[in-house]
Amino acid sequence: MKMRSPFGWLQQFWVVVVVVIALLLGAAVVGRLRTFFDSDLPFVAGSEHLDAIAPINTKQVTYEIVGPQTTAGRVSYLDAKGKTQEAGFTNLPWSVTIATTDPGILANVVAQGDSGSLGCRILVNDKVVAEQHAEGRAAQAFCLDKSA
């Protein structure tokens, strides 16, 4: 009868033993890292303190309608979120200013009045970026800036 060494089974299954040891060491390291960085705790939304984000580079977009002082009419313009807003005017000049921190917005204004002359302007931070004037019965003016 041939005598086997106590570690004879290791010669046949050494790859399996190495893989099992590597898995155990890997699990221990990952478990330690999870507790080290507190990632084993469940996430709770709103539980951490966040710094307030202060708006920087605020942009002022002003829509102006100009013409004879006694002109009445309607105006439509886009707000900071790109939604159409409508208003009426009974005398000119008429203006509205919107503020945004978006890097670029579509600025659009359309006005129609009961006079023979009407104009519109779009100002970004007090600089004229678009200006149009219209002449004729029930004049209508349209101004657009694609990158206000």
Image (cartoon, rainbow, N blue to C red):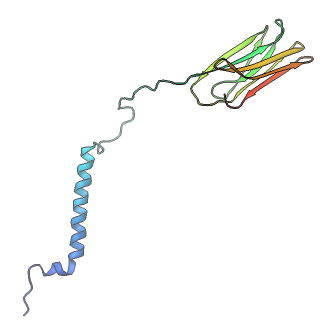
Q: Nearer the viewer, residue 113 or 104?
A: 104
Residue under the image location 16 percent in, 78 percent down: 10
Image coordinates for residue 54, horizontal then vertical, percent: 47, 24
Q: Residue at x 22, y 60 (%)?
A: 25
| Residue found at x 36% / y 29% | 49
Left or right of residue 102, residue 16 in this image: left
Residue at the farthest front position: 127
- Residue 13 coordinates in the image, percent (x, y): 21, 78
Q: Which sits in the foreground, 61 or 24?
A: 61
Report whether 39 appears left or right of 96: left
Q: Up-down: is 32 above or below 125?
A: below
Instruction: Say which quarter of the image contains residue 134.
Output: top right
Q: Check the image and name the residue furthest to the right.
A: 137
Q: Quadrant of the C terminus?
A: top right
Provide residue 79's location: percent of width, then percent of height: 66, 24
Name the outermost residue toward the bottom: 1
Residue 39 vertical position relative to residue 23 in the rendered view, above or below: above
- Image coords of residue 141 (percent x, y): 82, 21
Quadrant (top left/top right/bottom left/bottom right) for the N terminus? bottom left
**How many discs appear?**
0
Residue drawn at x 35%, y 40% as measured from the top left: 43
Q: Is residue 39 left or right of residue 107?
A: left
Instruction: Give the image quarter of residue 69.
Output: top right
In the depicted structure, whether residue 71 falls above or below residue 24:
above
